[in-house]
Amino acid sequence: MENILEMKNIVKEFDNCTALHEVDFSLKKGEIVAIIGPSGSGKSSLLRCINGLNTITSGSIELRGTTGMVFQHFNLFPHMTCIKNVAYAPIKVKKMDKEEAYKKGMELLDMVGLASKADDYPNHLSGGQKQRVAIARALAMEPDIMLFDEATSALDPEITGEVLEVMKRLAEEHMTMVVVTHEMGFAREVADRVVFMDHGKVVEEGTPEEIFENPKNERLKSFLSTVIRA
């Protein structure tokens, strides 16, 4: 299967800091890739280069499709109800008929378990509910690739599971996904491939079994020993 995304020799510099050092990254349609690594390793910068929020300093990106992104802090419009948040971009950007956009929006809210909250405003929702609305909003644009940037890190552990369940459901439906995450259990269970980054470089990548059961790089071994408790 051909790659839906190819990134070669990606360098991203911010002032005096180099966030990405000659990174190569590719993605096949239907593939789920988890990106793990310590804070400041370039994981989020890589996602933002994929969807164009960051302009690369050098290198090349070939993207055959569109992206949708779910951020750490939801970024919902506070003055809009849940259904309006979900339907807004299809109406504004895709010029979709309002009735059609709302119908599709309700289907997506139902898919994430929040159809009953359609007319609620974000400030009446829990963090987990806000993030599920954010996922529905990203899906409303029918992206070819879904990008998740630490989608559960701002949530209480008790409600992290409800967001991960929605992401697992998308994986079961073969949605192409790149997931930056600290949830090692999710990466092990759901990802087809796991990429470990450190200091702006891809240090090691492989299947979940290879990364978690037989890591080769000493830095990866050290990282896993700190994030996985016996």
Image (cartoon, helix red, strand yellow):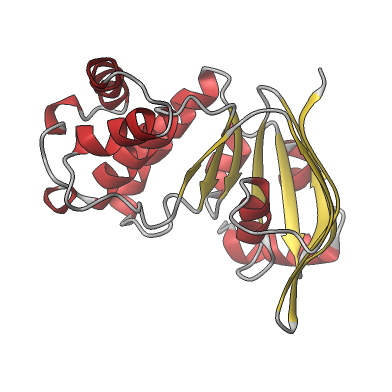
> Which quadrant would residue 102 be assigned to in this image?
top left
Q: Is residue 215 visible?
A: no
Residue positioned 74% across, 84% down in the render: 16
- Pick the quarter of the image with the N terminus: top right
Q: Residue at x 35, y 32 (%)?
A: 136
- Residue 78: x and y in percent read 20, 53
**Above or below, comparing residue 96 to residue 62 in the picture:** above
Whether residue 128 sits left or right of residue 180 in the image: it is left
Residue sitting nearer the eye, 154 or 218:
154
Question: As drawn, is 12 to the left or to the right of 124?
Answer: right
Along the line of sight, which residue is nearer the eye, 47 or 198?
Answer: 47
Choose top left, top right, bottom left or bottom right for residue 192: top right
Percent position of residue 221, x then y: 76, 61
Identified at 34% across, 56% down, the residue is 155
Q: Nearer the viewer, residue 104 or 227?
A: 104
Asked whether residue 161 appears in the rendered view, the answer is: yes
Q: Nearer the viewer, residue 71 or 56?
A: 56
Q: Which quadrant does the C terminus fall into? A: bottom right
